[in-house]
Amino acid sequence: RDLQKQKKAIEQEIEQTTVELEADQGLGADLKPVPKPTVRDLSVLDTGQQNMTTEEAEPDPDELQMGAVITAEEIKASADKSSADAKPEKPDEPSGPTEHKAASTDDILGQADDTTDSVAKPDDTTEPDAPAKPKLPRHLPKPKGPTSVAKTPKVMGYKLPKSMLLDEPEPATAPTETREQLLSNARLLKDTLKQFNIDVTEGDITKGPTITRYELHPAPGVRLERISALANNISAAIKAEHINILAPVPGRSSVGIEVPNRIKTKVLFRDIIDSPEWKKSKAKIPLALGKDVYGKPIVADLSEMPHLLIAGATGSGKSVCINSIVASLLFRFSPEELRFVMIDPKVVELQIYNGLPHLAAPVVHDPKKVILALKWVVNEMEKRYQIFAKVGARNIAGFNSRSKKKPEKTDQPELPLDEGEGFAVEMDQEVSVPRDEEIEIPEKLSYIVVIIDELADLMLMAKNDVENSIARITQMARAAGIHCIVATQRPSVDVITGVIKANIPARIAFQVAAKVDSRTILDAMGADKLLGKGDMLFLPPGTSNLSRAQGCLVTDEEINRIVEIVNNQAKPSYDKDMERQLETPAPGNGGNGGGIDEDEDLIQQCIEVIRVEQKASVSLMQRRLRLGYTRAARIMDELEDRGLVGPNRGAEPREILFDVED
């Protein structure tokens, strides 16, 4: 028995010693040893590293270069100096300095693209004269010839802009905070949490352009909610204006504390364009957005989003983000490959692009004509799907890469509807359906990017029409190669409605004033704690993890140089159908036309209802055609302008001024 007691005591002592050793090593929340901490300073641009050789050099201890790594021995040595009662540990074998190779910039973006593709001309062969078609009913629009999509301009010898047009990055400067200061802040964070009985271990320290992220590994059993609740205490301890706590860091077992830098570093647009991530990107429609906390360039793919929502308060960097997106597309696509539809109710934001050969129409400023532009996009989408159905393509990529061999015609049997047995068919009206011969098939289709700079102004003018058009585009236009970028500075629920949010999964949030605005944009908190001036939260499609980044800066002078180079190579080639629609008077202005086939179709249906019922009123149109009050009243005003009905007489129906028997 004595031996068993001694054996049990020895086992308990061994177990206790093992626990103490593991505590000295430091276990994280995942019950695994904490990895060796590293310190990275990515806020300083080292422009001279591109021409350096691969020989190993002795790092300067007084200056922290980009990507420099502090080994665990140095961190332990600094901790020994600050705490005299620390237990000496057995030093590990020294590890060699980490070798970092600078990114090569030999490949310069901007080589000339062979733009020999052009839109196929319609066949010169014409079929013999067909017998005259019977007269269509009044409520159907008249056929307007063959169905064709928007023509793409043919520009010979077009060359993409080069990065030499952009401003060069500023020379590297000394870091604002030394390595010892960063380590001292990490120890201060650990001691602050220790005062509240929260045991943590220092982790990696990453200094980005705008913020510095300190990672802490909590001990097993520590509730992360306790650390998040101490945000104000931590902010007071390190004397920061405000901090952001990630509990945990997405994809890691550590807690991240983001502290604003005293001096922020700019992320230039040229840094993204010259980066290997941009040059080697396989994205179909790449967008240069900025750099994340770890200094990695963010190059998103608009075709995978497939639509983007940008929101933020005034002065937060929203307009600069739109300029960087447009510049990204101009650096990658020719006018034959991509077209713009720009809507700018504020007049001044996108006016600089008025005259680009990429534009399908001049920049739309009148909010009353925005509906015409959006419905033109919807009609273009429907025409493209008709073409896809004819050639057997599923999307724009399959259509452009299809075989150019023309399929053979096959005679399809037609049922004589007037003599069909077992069918109750009425032949008092004929419906015109576009045949295959009436659809022009181009060789290639270009991408179309719709940019709406201020959604709030449009929602005030015609909320239902704008919301319905945006919903149709965002729901169906992805396969047709049409993508929508919507921006607003008033992220409220009446502007960013549930219908719009449901169909735009990718979002960028800049600094906002309240937490409710952050939830409206991202369905999460955090945008109210941003610092402004390009500090943003990016929500990629298909994930709920927010990525904090610093948006890239493109100045007005750079935009002017890019636009000048592009405009000197080609003149604007606007789509005739869209230009004709935009030149017509806007709905509700007393014009003689509705400007779009859909409104004209509704007007003809209203005339038919008046002919049958022999009375005219807004409530009658609402019941029979299932319209809203605003739309029914607008169509009734249009009938009054045409002289078909009389003015409003209160509760009594309007007077009918045309012959209902004719």
Image: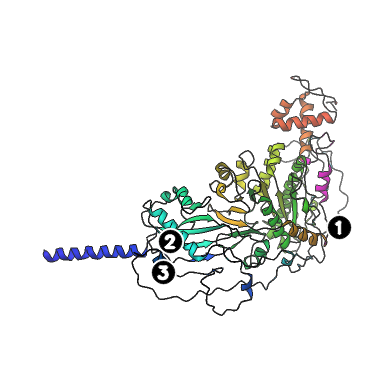
Image mark for residue 77? 3
Specify start and end residues of the magenta stretch as a single range: 569-597
Q: Identify the residue under disc 1.
A: 125
Residue 294 percent across, percent down from the top left: 55, 62
Give above or below for 88 relative to 123: below
Q: Magenta stretch containing residue 586, yes or no? A: yes
Tag 3 or tag 1, which sits nearer the N-term? Answer: 3
Q: Count of labels shown?
A: 3
| Residue 252 appears anywhere in the view | no
Residue 284 percent across, percent down from the top left: 66, 61
Locate the N terminus by quadrant.
Answer: bottom left
Instruction: Name the outermost residue toward the left.
Output: 1
Tag 2 or tag 3, which sits nearer the N-term? Answer: 3
Residue 168 percent across, percent down from the top left: 69, 66
- Residue type for callout 2: Glu
In whole angstroms, how far apart are the C-alphas of marks 3 and 2? Answer: 14 Å
Q: Identify the residue under disc 2.
A: 202
Residue drawn where x is 50% and y is 69% of the image: 69
Task: Please tell me which residue lies in front, 198 or 649.
Answer: 198
Query: Callout 2: few (<14), some (14-19), or many (20+) C-alpha neighbours within 10 Å?
Result: many
Q: At numbered mark 3, what does the secondary structure look like: helix, strand or loop?
A: helix
Check whether the beta carbons of the residues at disc 2 and disc 1 lie within 8 A of each other: no
Give above or below for 111 relative to 249: below
Q: Magenta stretch containing residue 584, yes or no? A: yes
Question: Which image quarter: residue 345?
Answer: top right
- Residue type for callout 1: Thr
